Amino acid sequence: MERLKILVVDDESRMRKLVSDFLTKQNYEVLEAEDGAQAIDIFFEVKDIALIILDVMMPKMDGWQVCREIRQYSRVPIIMLTARADERDELQGFELGVDEYVTKPFSPKILVARVEAILRRANAIVSDDILSAGGIEVNKAAHIVTIDGSAVELSYKEFELLTYFMENQGLALSREKILNNVWNYDYFGDARTIDTHVKKLRSKLGSRGDYIKTIWGMGYKFEVEG
C-alpha cells in the first residue's frame, strides 16, 4: 500500500528530525520544509499530501500565512505547532480551519496519535473495520471482540467504549469527551456512568484491562506498552 505523505514545516531542523523520525517509524512518507515559503512550494508541487504539521513562528512566512494560503485551495488536515499556549492563537487557528493545535514542548508519540486520529476522521487511513492493539482485536462491522483469538462478550456500550479507546490510542480523553462520543449527548450528571463501564470493561479484558489507564481528575487513556 502506498505510504501517506505528511509535510512537516518547522524552521528548527532538530524539531523536524524528531517529528519526521517518529512518523517514518509509523510508515508515513515525510516531506520537510524549513520555512513557510518552501512549504507552499512543496504543497503545490506534490499533489497528494495527506496532512501538514505546521509551526507558527517561522521566517519569511509564518504558519498563519501558510494556513491562509493553503485554505484558499485545499481542506487538507493541518496540525499547528506553537510555543505559546495563547487562547487568541488557538481561536485564530480554528477560524483559519486548523484541525488540531499542539503546544510545544509535546510528546512525539502523542503527536503521532493525533495525526492518526485526524487521518482516520478524514478517511485517509482506510481500515476494513478491524482495530487491533496489544492482542485485542475489534471487528466493528461484525461487533466482535477477541483477545489472542478468543472471543470476549461485551455489552453494546462496552463495545462502543473499547472501540473509542482503541481509535484514540495514546490520547488523554476527558470523561466529558468520552460521554459525548460514546453516549452521544452532553451528560450533565456525575461521571459514575463512565467509571462503572470502564470498571466492567477492564474486568472483561482481563490482564489487557491495564491498557486503560486512569488519569486522575480528568479521565482515561488507552495505551499499549512496548
Image (cartoon, rainbow, N blue to C red):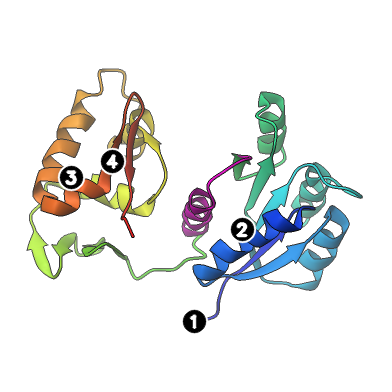
Instruction: Determine whether, in the image, residue 187 is placed left or right of residue 36.
Output: left
> Label 2 near label 3: C-beta < 8 Å?
no
Q: Secondary structure at mark 3?
A: helix
Instruction: Determine whether, in the image, residue 99 is placed left or right of residue 153.
Output: right
Q: Which mark is residue 130?
A: none
- 108 drawn magenta: yes
Marks 3/2: CA–CA distance: 34 Å
Compared with 6, 187 (above or below) is: above
Instruction: Determine whether, in the image, residue 147 is placed left or right of residue 119.
Output: left
Q: Amino acid at mark 2?
A: Val
Stretch of the chain drawn in magenta: 103-121
Crowdedness near tag 4: few (<14), some (14–19) or many (≥20) residues, C-alpha within 10 Å: some
- Residue 193 occupies which quadrant of the picture? top left
- For label 3, the residue is 158
- Could you tell which of marks 3 and 4 lies nearer the N-terminus? 3
Crowdedness near tag 1: few (<14), some (14–19) or many (≥20) residues, C-alpha within 10 Å: few
- For label 2, the residue is 19
